[in-house]
Image (cartoon, grey):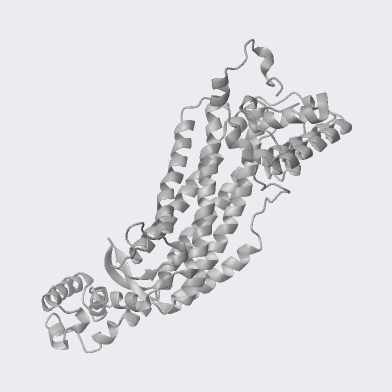
Amino acid sequence: MSEKLWQGRFSEKTADIVEAFTSSIQIDRRLYAYDIQGSMAHCKMLAKAAVISEADAGVLIGGLEKIRQEIAAGRFRFDDALEDIHMHIENRLGEIVGPVAEKLHTARSRNDQVALDVRMYLRHETSHIIDRFHRLLTVIVGLAKNNLDVILPGYTHMQRAQPVLLAHHLMAYYEMFSRDIQRLESCLTRINVMPLGAAALAGTTYPIDRAYTAGLLRFDALTANSIDAVSDRDFIMEFLSNASIAMVHFSRLSEELILWSTTEFGFVQLPDAFATGSSIMPQKKNPDVPELVRGKTGTVIGCLTALLTMMKSLPLAYNRDMQEDKAVLFNAVDILKACIEVYSAMLPQIRFNREVMQQAAAAGYLDATDMADYLVGRGMSFRLAHRLVGEAVSFALGKQKELHELTLDELQSFSPLIRRDIFSKLSIQQMVDRRACYGGTATATVKKAVAAAEKQLKQKKTHLPGFHLERESQEVP
């Protein structure tokens, strides 16, 4: 390898232990396609501005393309002595095209170069994550549509509360993940801002055309302040915050599937292909996928915490601490993508135990609120109705009966307003379907919500954000 690009200032060779400690190439090598794409656009801009000749730009772009092919094919040699992906590419470019390679870095710095690479990487990944989330939403809506006749207990404080449609419960996750998409789409507008041209921190004296470069690279805007451009990692923190919220949603869903798959609940059976067994207990079927998703949530939240902690005391502008941003970002992106994929594959194969859910919804005094509402409908104040029904529940507990199992005479002992029609009002289906307000669990309301979601998903599919630049998604072998 040749000497370091910044070697002129130094009289001693960098210690081997320092080279290994400061090197980021094992992490940032996955940015190679973005770094090369950005360098090609930079070359074209330099030629347009007459900073370099068209001939030199052609040579540089040809060399960069050869490097891209070498890395993609696994023929490229990486070395800690060259620190990062930028220096690796520029050094190899010199070996391929000779001294003209030294013109590539004109009017830029590694500070704005790495900011560019990360923004290109993250907008690409964010776009793909949004696409994956849409597929997951399609799965959830399909499950809801296929289970519109299934009733289960809704819970508060992990206690049975009121009967709800399984479809309504599933659509709650549709709402959560829809908000995740909205946050990512909003974040994408702040990711897609081009920092190149800020150079080290003060801009450049060369007559560059930042708007031209931005157009080549499909950026919607330019950074307005060169100091902020190289020191800003807000867009990563925002993405990690959004990823953490999304993972919390996955974790809550995972917790429910773990509980529902226990013998104690028996609400669902997870597919064998998404479960594992025990090394000692032959009967075990463990919900490892939901458990791992629940566990990985902590890792993603940790990535956000790590970056927030790193950035909180950094003075302007660039500091080497910021090299650590990529490890946590890449880790969080990989985890979120994997969790979306595994859930999109697993959810359609889950079997819901309808009868068990229905039986659970019929027990536990889930009709108490409806009895109170019944009395209110006959002119009683809600507070008095609440107290009287509470007394009825206490009485039924002593009889080891449900409210709807009490006789009419027993019910009327708590209020003469109660009539025989109370029993139809306390049927599970009636309790569900009377909650027909917008956003409620009534079958007709949930059908409308499912239909609206299907329509929304079809409309969204036609204008998904796309930053699928040529070869942008290739990974380092």
- Residue 66, image quadrant: top right
Left or right side of 108 for 389: left
Q: Nearer the viewer, residue 325 or 196?
A: 325
Percent of width and height locating residue 168: 42, 70
**The C terminus: image quadrant:** top right
Q: Position of residue 89 (x, y in %)?
A: 71, 32
312 lies left or right of 228: left
Image point (64%, 39%), residue name: 31
Q: Residue at x 72, y 43 (%)?
A: 217
Query: Which residue is drawn at the image coordinates 78% and 40% (left, top)?
Result: 65
Viewer can see residue 291: yes
- The image shows residue 301, relative to residue 89, as above or below, that is below
Please state if 93 lies on the left or on the right of 331 as rendered: right
- State the image quarter where residue 425 is shown: bottom left
| Image spot of residue 189 (x, y percent) | 61, 47
* Residue at the spot 35% in from the left edge and 81% down from the top edge: 429
Could you say which quadrant of the image residue 432 lies in? bottom left
> Quick check: 432 left or right of 75?
left
Residue that protrudes farthest toward the top in the picture:
11
